[in-house]
Image (spheres, helix red, strand yellow):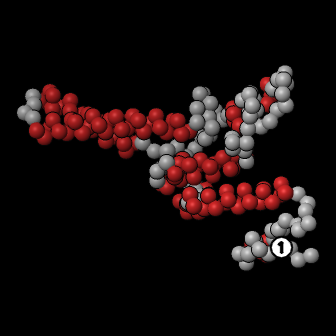
Amino acid sequence: MLEADRLRTAQIKVEAAHRQALQARKLLDTSMLPPEKRADLTEIVASAKTLGADFSVPVVGPIFASSKGTALNMNNLLNRQILPVLNRCQPCHKVKDGHAKADHEYKRDESLPSWHGFHGFRRGLGTNLKRLGVDLKTIQEILRHAHIATTADIYVKEVSEQAVEAMDRLERHVVGELKKGPKSEPAISYSAVNLQHGSWAVTPYAE
């Protein structure tokens, strides 16, 4: 079970206790109650307060843990769980390892994300949690960073939709130029210098 699953389970318990405590407070404030009932409601409020005070994100132990709480073998996790999901054939959607008897050549589905290692996995987790509206403090605790600046500056990448669209347009243009192949007027070559001067669309490499 992932650490995030355990965290969410604990959060659900705290939220349920908090809702019960709110109802109990309303009854305590607005109702004439017998002593026994009042004592029961007071106990509910106290229990919710204690549970909330004790709740915290674990700072020790494996992030990727088995049902027994021991660390998972990361190579097994990668090869048995992650890569089979990412490496699927585009025409038939079969995993790469199970494609040997297919009647066509394996072609990876490029619409699926590529694997960039567990560090990239953690950065992607932080960025996606931020996009889902999770606050930075919670993301910091999930990733177990000592300083929130590490989470904000390195692991969470804020990318606007306009920036993504701009890079997609650039990629489509470059791919289109490369597909044209040799011709009388060579396709524009893109250099770091040209990019720095913002003139990549008009300035080729100097021959």
Q: Is residue 36 visible?
A: yes
Q: Is residue 10 left or right of residue 67?
A: left
Around disc 1, counting alpha carbons within 10 Å, would you say few (fewer than 14), some (14 to 19), or many (20 or more)?
some
Residue 114 placed where, x, y %?
72, 44
| Number of disc labels | 1
Amino acid found under the numbered disc labelled 1: Pro
Q: Is residue 193 left or right of residue 135?
A: right
Instruction: State the image quarter where residue 199 is shown.
Output: bottom right
Q: Is residue 18 left or right of residue 154?
A: left
Residue 142 placed where, x, y %?
54, 47
Q: Is residue 73 visible?
A: no
Residue at the far front: name it: 184
Observer-nearest of 36 and 199: 199
At x 20%, y 29%, the residue is 40
Task: Look at mark 1 in the image and give the residue it sits on.
Answer: 204
Q: Is residue 85 left or right of residue 185?
A: left
At x 88%, y 57%, the residue is 181
Instruction: State the image quarter where residue 22 is shown.
Output: top left
Quarter placement of the N terminus? top right
Q: Is residue 120 above or below residue 96?
A: below
Residue 49 placed where, x, y %?
31, 42
Where disc 1 sits, the SS reads: loop
Quarter placement of the C terminus? bottom right
At x 74%, y 60%, the residue is 173
Residue at the far top: name it: 101
Observer-nearest of 56 and 123: 123
Observer-nearest of 107 and 86: 107
Residue 99 placed where, x, y %?
81, 26
At x 79%, y 71%, the residue is 192
Observer-nearest of 26 and 70: 26
